[in-house]
Image (cartoon, grey):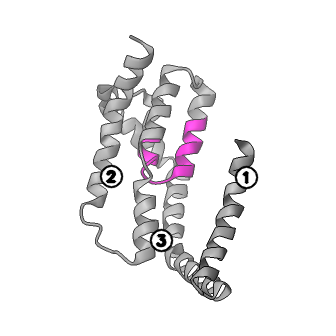
Amino acid sequence: MDKLGTLILPAAAVGIVVFCLFRKVPVFDAFLTGAKQGLKTSIDILPTLIGLITGVAMLQASGALDLLAKALSPLTNLLGLPPAVAPLVLMKPVSGSGSTAILTQIFEQYGADSYTGRVASVLSGSTETAFYCIAVYYGSIGVHKTRHTLPAALAGDLAACLAAPLAVQFLFYR
């Protein structure tokens, strides 16, 4: 099975080249055109990504994330979320790597098999980096009005916050 996984990508590349030759498409020219378009897309979304990464770094470095988590602790306690998970709830919609760092800290402090670690794991796996995805995907195609995307994504994250403690209680502590 491992060998199959290592052969899939080269086989797909060879299959694409054979398909293009069969359809009489100039393979190298098509590759260069695609590479140029990919580079242009990367440059187009770069300012948005730099802004997002800078904002996340400022939130973490200034301690504003921790203050916000403490301010929201009555609400998180009401939802059954451990206080240590609140920074993860706040960071996950913004940054995947930032939330992974917080998740790692939770694992190191409380353990992955603790209630806090399990709730953090479920939250991390069931939420999405909504702001990052909107910035990258909408930025790459030039969409500025996100309409219902952000409210729907945040509603999904809220649903995960409500369901994670219940799921952990049901699966591990009943």
Which residue is denoted by mark 1 in the rendering?
6
| Label 3: how many Cα within 10 Å (few below 14, some 14–19, many 20+) | some
The residue positioned farthest toward the left in the image shown:
148
Q: Main secondary structure of the magenta part?
A: helix
163 w.r.t. 61: above or below: above
Amino acid, disc 3: Thr
Kindly identify which residue carries mark 2: 153
Within-10-Å neighbours for mark 2: few <14, some 14–19, many 20+: some
Q: Earlier in the sequence, mark 2 or mark 1?
A: 1
x then y, percent, for residue 158: 31, 41
93 in the magenta segment: yes
What residue is disc 3 on? 48
**Residue 86 position within the rendered picture, expressed as x and y whole percent measured from the top left:** 42, 36
Label 2 is placed on what type of residue?
Answer: Ala
Residue depicted at x 65% and y 75%: 18
How much space separates mark 3 and mark 2, taking CA atoms?
A: 19 Å
- Earlier in the chain: of badge 1 and badge 3, it is 1
Residue at 39% across, 78% down:
142
